[in-house]
Image (cartoon, helix red, strand yellow):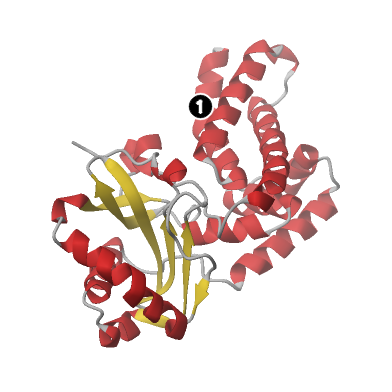
């Protein structure tokens, strides 16, 4: 098989690894491109397993990016969220398939793991690599990688990160959330929001957003009334400026001004209630949304 064909057959996996480790579409694309350049210059005959070689290069570059980003993140204003992964742009044939491995909630959890825990968990639990191979990628012992993945798994397990519902129910709850918030309908909001609901918004200092993560109905609903109700009332009159878009594994609500996305809401749903709401407001991240004509 030609070198380019070998790379292309692994490209989606490489992008998936890089995005889940870095939380950045832009960085993941750059990493995959750099991996290709290194692959193109490599002596393939000396490489026993092309997939392992490509995955190792991608993983190590991703970890370098994360270590650098964590230093830069210290100056980030307000809560941080990953860049949106708009699956249809990456794999059009998989649009409308719910993917629990890239939810906003999971990506936030992964960001809270140590770099080594994150890589071990992602490579083993999400991409099914053997610990022996992961050990080679991370330059650690196999036993160490097992412990790292186990610690990461436990931290993920005890936090809600999956939307346990159908795509149809998911979309109906998005509409219910929008309507109840628009109308300041506290009764309905208390029915569709969990008691410990979490509201997490990312403006990056470039757009209005909550300055900290809001937790619990008693904190979230008053903030909705003050900030979201007036905004949603405006977008009710601009129905063509709010759309349901698929990103990070599930449908979400996107608000537009013309062809420019200004807010993107992602919901985590469990037992027919909304457990988490993640809102992208940072224009640098929202630019990845492209309005369909």
Q: Can residue 39 be seen in this view?
A: yes
Q: Is residue 270 above or below residue 147?
A: below
Q: Is residue 40 above or below residue 176?
A: above
Q: Nearer the viewer, residue 271 or 236?
A: 236
- Residue identifier under label 1: 9
Q: Which residue is drawn at 82% across and 49% down?
A: 142
Image quarter hosting the C terminus:
top left
Which percent across, then down, holds residue 275? 44, 74
Which percent across, then down, holds residue 141? 86, 47
Left or right of 156, for residue 147: right
Left or right of 92, for residue 15: right
Q: Which of 217 and 205 is in front in this view?
A: 205
Which percent across, then down, holds residue 15? 53, 35
Q: Nearer the viewer, residue 87 or 67?
A: 67
Q: Which residue is drawn at 72% across and 46% down?
A: 71
Choose top left, top right, bottom left or bottom right for residue 146: bottom right
Q: Residue at x 25, y 46 (%)?
A: 257
Question: Mark 1, residues whose alpha carbon is within 10 Å: few (<14), some, or many (≥20)?
Answer: few
Q: Is residue 97 visible?
A: no
Image quarter hosting the N terminus:
top right
Which percent across, then down, holds residue 229? 28, 71
């Amino acid at each position: 098989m030609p070198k380019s064909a070998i790379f292309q057959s692994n490209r989606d996996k490489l992008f998936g690894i890089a995005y889940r480790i870095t939380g950045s579409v832009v960085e993941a694309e750059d990493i995959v491109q750099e991996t290709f350049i290194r692959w193109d210059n490599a002596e393939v005959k000396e490489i026993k397993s092309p997939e392992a070689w490509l995955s190792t290069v991608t993983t190590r570059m991703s970890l370098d990016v994360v270590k650098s980003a964590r230093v830069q993140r210290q100056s980030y204003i307000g809560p941080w969220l990953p860049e949106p992964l708009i699956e249809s742009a990456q794999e059009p044939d998989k649009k409308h398939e719910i993917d629990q491995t890239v939810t906003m909630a999971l990506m936030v959890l992964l960001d809270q793991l140590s770099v080594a825990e994150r890589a071990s968990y992602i490579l083993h639990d999400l991409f099914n690599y053997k610990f022996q191979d992961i050990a080679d990628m991370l330059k650690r012992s196999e036993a160490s990688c097992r412990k790292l993945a186990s610690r990461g798994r436990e931290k993920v397990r005890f936090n809600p990160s999956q939307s346990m519902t159908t795509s149809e129910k998911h979309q109906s709850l998005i509409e219910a959330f929008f309507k109840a918030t628009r109308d300041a309908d506290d009764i309905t909001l208390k029915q569709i929001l969990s008691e410990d609901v979490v509201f997490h918004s990312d403006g990056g200092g470039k757009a209005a957003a909550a300055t900290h993560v809001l937790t619990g109905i008693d904190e979230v609903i008053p903030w909705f009334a003050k900030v979201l109700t007036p905004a949603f009332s405006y977008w009710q009159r601009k129905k063509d400026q709010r759309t349901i878009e698929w990103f990070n594994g599930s449908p979400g609500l996107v608000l537009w001004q013309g062809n420019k996305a200004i807010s993107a809401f992602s919901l985590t749903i469990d037992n027919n209630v909304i457990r988490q709401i993640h809102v992208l407001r940072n224009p640098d991240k929202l630019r990845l949304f492209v309005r369909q004509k």
